[in-house]
């Protein structure tokens, strides 16, 4: 009997041993993804602490444990792009796209990798190929803006890019709204939201400079529109045509009113900036000028969005203005455009128009960066990703400055171009296509 028990025990031990050996690969396979997720969590912690090499090691180790997980590969690719290793990132992204050809994030990262490698044509082709799978998103304002920007970088199909950005800007302008903003274009609205955020970041002076440049242009437009209206009315007095029914007068008056309202909004905004700086004389002068234009400065300011709402618009507005300004710097510049043309357009191609767009986009990017040290950015998630987000915004500022640098170069403004080049270097980047 004792022998029988021993035999049964021996057989049991053998069966357990065989089963454990057989199950080991299955356990390893089952635990692989769990261990990989643990490694990915560790990698994120290392990234937040600035320990990039350790983080990359953990991510690669995670991929080794779960080689079919596309999220891990795309996370590593994104981080590699951040540290200027686009070639390896491109290989990882292509691996994912071979298995998941409709993966939107993979397509975006492939585009970024190609941009960093300077292959703007291939980046555009990636976007166009993927565009077919987006359905209704293909015609959204952000998507139109994105395609217009990629066409501008590739310097191809620029008329199509112009068409897309016109529609995109019109849509974006409707998205950024507050009471009484009917006559305001995207550039004016973006200036206002940037100035409101600037008040919380001790960046009042930068906002004042941008507003002052725009007001100088608006005053010229008001003067020209007023002279045009007066001249037209005078010419009609020499005829028997009923002045009150003349559509030309109505169009000219509407144009003049639009310029005056834009100026009133910017003056009201600048008055707030001067008020913060305790420059009461300048503040009062702006409010008096608003009164002279026939508007109420206090009411205009009361209708502005609050700072926490304004900060949400900065990235959005900057992206559209950057695309329009950069594209404008590439297209033939137009002169003597009929301001009373019946065709409504969000795109007037001239040096001053492109410069205005890029100046405002640069201001948006700068105050957005500075806002991370203010009470406007106090969420836990933003705090966790602060270093990475600041790095992204710094690079974005460098790209915007490079766009303005190339604009100045085309216009023959060499000193201004040199100034922008130095500003890019001060941000820790090298001017050139490699910025993209």
Image (spheres, helix red, strand yellow):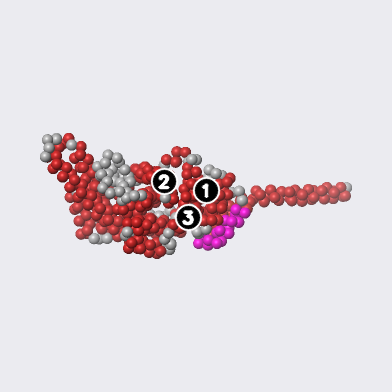
The Cα atoms of the two marked residues, 3 and 1, are separated by 18 Å
Residue pictured at 55% horizontal, 46% vertical: 97
Where is residue 41, by image quadrant?
bottom right
On the image, the x and y values in percent for residue 215 come to 25, 53
The Cα atoms of the two marked residues, 2 and 3, are separated by 18 Å
Q: Nearer the viewer, residue 135 or 224?
A: 224
Q: Which residue is mark 1?
A: 106
Say left or right for 40 vs 373: right
Q: Is residue 48 visible?
A: no
**Magenta stretch bounds:** 47-64
Q: Which sits earlier in the primary sequence, circle 2 or circle 3?
A: 3
Between label 2 and label 1, give the one nearer the viewer. Answer: 2
**Residue 91 vertical placement versus 344 (above, below):** below
Residue pictured at 60% horizontal, 54% vertical: 62
On the image, the x and y values in percent for residue 167 come to 36, 42
Between label 3 and label 1, give the one nearer the viewer. Answer: 3
| Residue 254 numbered tag | none
Q: Is residue 57 visible?
A: yes
Q: Secondary structure at mark 1?
A: helix
- Main SS, magenta region, reads helix
Question: Crowdedness of circle 3 by 10 Å Cα count: few (<14), some, many (20+)?
Answer: some
Q: Nearer the viewer, residue 237 or 15?
A: 237
Q: Which residue is mark 2?
A: 157
Between label 2 and label 3, give the one nearer the viewer. Answer: 2
Question: Crowdedness of circle 2 by 10 Å Cα count: few (<14), some, many (20+)?
Answer: few
Q: Which residue is mark 3?
A: 118
Residue pictured at 22% horizontal, 40% vertical: 251
Q: Which sits earlier in the primary sequence, circle 3 or circle 1?
A: 1
């Amino acid at each position: 009997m004792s022998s029988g028990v021993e035999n049964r025990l021996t057989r049991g031990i053998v069966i357990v041993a065989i089963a454990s050996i057989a199950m080991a690969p299955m356990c390893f396979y089952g635990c692989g993804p769990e261990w990989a997720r643990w490694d990915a969590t560790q990698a994120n912690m290392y990234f937040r602490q600035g320990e990039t090499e350790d983080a990359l090691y953990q991510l690669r180790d995670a991929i080794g444990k779960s080689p079919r997980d596309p999220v891990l590969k795309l996370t590593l690719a994104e981080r590699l792009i951040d540290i200027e290793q686009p070639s390896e990132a491109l290989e990882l992204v292509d691996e994912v796209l071979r298995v998941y050809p409709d993966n939107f994030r993979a397509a975006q990262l492939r585009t970024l990798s190609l941009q960093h490698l300077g292959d703007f044509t291939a980046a555009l082709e990636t976007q166009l190929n993927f565009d077919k799978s987006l359905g209704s998103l293909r015609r959204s304002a952000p998507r139109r803006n994105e395609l217009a920007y990629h066409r501008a970088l590739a310097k191809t199909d620029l008329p199509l890019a112009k068409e897309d950005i016109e529609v995109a800007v019109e849509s974006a302008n409707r998205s950024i709204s507050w009471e009484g903003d009917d006559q305001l274009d995207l550039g004016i609205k973006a200036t206002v939201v940037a100035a409101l955020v600037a008040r919380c970041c001790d960046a009042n002076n930068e906002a004042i400079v941008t507003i002052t440049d725009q007001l100088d242009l608006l005053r010229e437009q008001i003067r020209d529109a007023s002279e045009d209206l007066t001249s037209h009315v005078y010419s009609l007095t020499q005829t028997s045509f009923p002045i009150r029914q003349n559509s030309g007068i109505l169009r000219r008056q509407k144009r003049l009113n639009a310029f005056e309202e834009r100026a009133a909004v910017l003056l009201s905004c600048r008055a707030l900036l001067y008020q913060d700086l305790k420059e009461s004389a300048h503040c009062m002068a702006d409010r008096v000028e608003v009164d002279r234009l026939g508007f109420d400065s206090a009411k205009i300011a009361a209708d502005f969005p609050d700072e926490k709402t304004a900060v949400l618009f900065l990235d959005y507005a900057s992206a559209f203005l950057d695309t329009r300004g950069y594209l404008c710097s590439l297209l033939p510049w137009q002169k003597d455009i009929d301001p009373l043309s019946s065709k409504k357009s969000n795109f007037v191609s001239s040096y001053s128009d492109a410069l205005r767009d890029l100046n405002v986009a640069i201001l948006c990017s700068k105050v957005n960066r500075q806002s991370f040290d203010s009470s406007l950015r106090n969420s836990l998630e933003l705090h966790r990703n602060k270093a990475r987000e600041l790095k992204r915004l710094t690079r974005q500022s460098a790209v915007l400055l490079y766009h303005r640098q190339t604009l100045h170069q085309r216009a023959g403004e060499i000193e201004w171009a040199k100034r922008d080049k130095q500003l890019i270097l001060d941000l820790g980047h090298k001017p050139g296509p490699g910025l993209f």
